[in-house]
Amino acid sequence: MAKITLDKLSHSYDPNPSGPDDYALKEIDLDWVDGGAYALLGPSGCGKSTLLNIISGLLTPSDGRVLFDGKDVTDLPPDQRNIAQVFQFPVIYDTMSVYDNLAFPLRNRGVDAARVDKRVMEIATMLELEDQLKTRASNLTPDNKQKISMGRGLVRDDVNVVMFDEPLTVIDPAQKWKLRSKLKELHQKIAVTMIYVTHDQTEALTFADQVVVMQDGIIVQIGTPVELFERPRHTFVGHFIGSPGMNVLPCEVSGGLATFGGHPVELEGRISKVGQKTEIGIRPEYVRLTDSGIPAVVRKAADIGRHTVVEVIAGKSSINAIIDGPPPEAGTQVHLSFDPSQTRVYSDGWIATEVAS
Amino acid sequence: MKTENPKAWFFVLPVLVLVAFNALIPLMTVVNYSVQETFGNNLFFWQGLDWFENILRSDRFHGALGRQILFTATILAIEIPLGVIIALAMPRSGPWVSVCLVLMALPLLIPWNVVGAMWNIFTLPDIGLLGYTLNTVLGIDYDMTQNPTAAWATIILMDVWHWTSLVVLLAYAGLISIPEPYYQAARIDGASNWSVFRYIQLPKMKRVLTIAVLLRFMDSFNIYTEVFVLTGGGPGNSTTLLSIDLVKVALGQFDLGNAAAMSLIYFAFTLLVSWLFYTIMMKDEE
């Protein structure tokens, strides 16, 4: 158990990187608190697996350090870091029984047989594999194979962190739910730091206490699921999280006021900086169709269960609004109003409004 | 409901004809010979199973079969582990992969009789590179045309040189199909190199190695050309393997009935061992 610190970490797969574009990770500073449940969220190729492999020691970073409880482990191999990692595809030792699979990491470390037996039984019970301990691992279903992979990570009680690299990719949807809640339950039981890498926002938001959002090798925002949803620090976060994502609309800023298509837009607070590109960010949940406000034309409406997503065109921009009740027909003239407390200006992608105190 | 379309047979016909002409009809001819005594002028006399009985009781056949089994067992015991070791040592990525693969494929590309001829010259005591080096430079008395042990060492060395590559290529194909996370997980689990080999690499190579053993068993059990060109079965009959003996009987003595019965026993033995081995290896696969 340890606090994990990433200190000015960067990594390039190119041995002679010539510019920032050659870096898969660009200067990352981050603390993972002991016992936390983290999700590392981002699209494919954003560097999240690279970051994970650096923490586990499978990769050595080009620059920067990895600290476990203040101790530099950057050059230590994975087996000396006391970490566990679960991969995208279940890794099992085919010829071994389920029991031997779970016991393998302990036996390799010379743990005595009685203790191995105790731990294996505990973990097998937690994962509901106790009936299958004698089965050959190769005969299991994919979700049970992945449970074994997880079990091998969890069986050692001295691990600093257990990392999951998109572990539910090959699991069918019904099992996904079960495994995810199992994982959450396990975390509450054994309170070891867990880092869960995924590109699926639902997985990230349901599993984690803290979500780390990455894009193009940088960390865009760290926060609780609610924080990420309520106040995205970057248009990318707003767009990536939420379904549909945040509306990002081009706007003009002059004299501390934002206008969209010539209409003044009321914001959550003062604009603190103005860059080259300014945009308004507003989630569809806070866009309302009213009698007065920004004029728009309804393009289409989609029923998503309890709500309706209405897509409207205002000027050249397409805006999503989530409304209750019957949707207007396509082609209807409507007016939009934005909830001021949820309307923000983003300057060059980054949030540029301050909450009025 | 399964509907049967008789036209389907039409599509299978070419294969049936092909198989009939290259396997079934020749085999049946052999069966026909094996139960008769042949003389000149196409005279045939019914012999029943006498030939089979004679062969199974003959010391000559026992000797050839024994030598054949010894040869095949020896080359399998060398080529399979050696092939696996070389495959493990080969790089998995980078520019050296193609270099290694080409080097490995080279011996396989050489025609069999050329292999025999090459080794024949290579081992000549007066001018062959190996023969000269052993006799003159190292002072070891080596002449495979005189000494049965030297002849055996040479045919085994030749076969290892010629065919280990096949095992290497198959084992290598098995190895590179193992996804990287297996190795990563093993490192994280603290597995030793031996454990990685024993629990990851070997199980993942099992299928290709089964194929490798089968191919090498069948090929080496039926080996003729290379050994015939190299030693001609000598000195004496010390390297007279089954196929060499068979050709001596069939073409040297023109003893067709005897040779035919011997072929069938030989064939049945190869088939039986291959089938047994495959069945045992695949027993615990689903």
Image (cartoon, coloured by chain):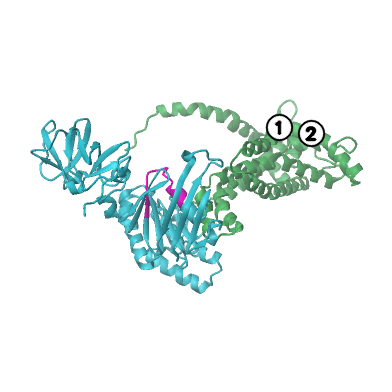
Chain colours: A cyan, B green
- Subunit ID for the residue under disc 2: B
Disc count in the image? Answer: 2
Q: Amino acid at mark 2?
A: Met
The image shows residue B187 at horizontal and vertical percentages of: 54, 56
Answer with the quarter of the image where residue A313 lies. top left
Question: What is the distance, in whole Å, between disc 1 and disc 2 at their CAs?
Answer: 10 Å
Name the residue beneath numbered marker 1.
B110
Front-most of B78 and B253? B78
Against A266, residue B195 (above or below) is below
- Subunit ID for the residue under disc 1: B
Quadrant in which the N terminus of chain B is drawn: top left
Q: Please provide the residue range marked out in magenta.
A: A39-51
- Left/right placement of residue A318 relative to residue A168 reads left
- Left/right placement of residue B233 relative to residue B185 reads right
Tell me the residue at 42%/48% (across/down): A48
Name the residue beneath numbered marker 2.
B118
Q: Tag on residue B74?
A: none
Front-most of B240 and A12? A12
Front-most of B195 and B26? B195
- Quick one: SS at disc 2? helix
Which label's residue is closer to the chain start, 1 or 2?
1
- Quick one: SS at disc 1? loop
Answer with the quarter of the image where residue A289 lies. top left
Do callouts 1 and 2 mark residues in contact (Cβ within 8 Å)? yes
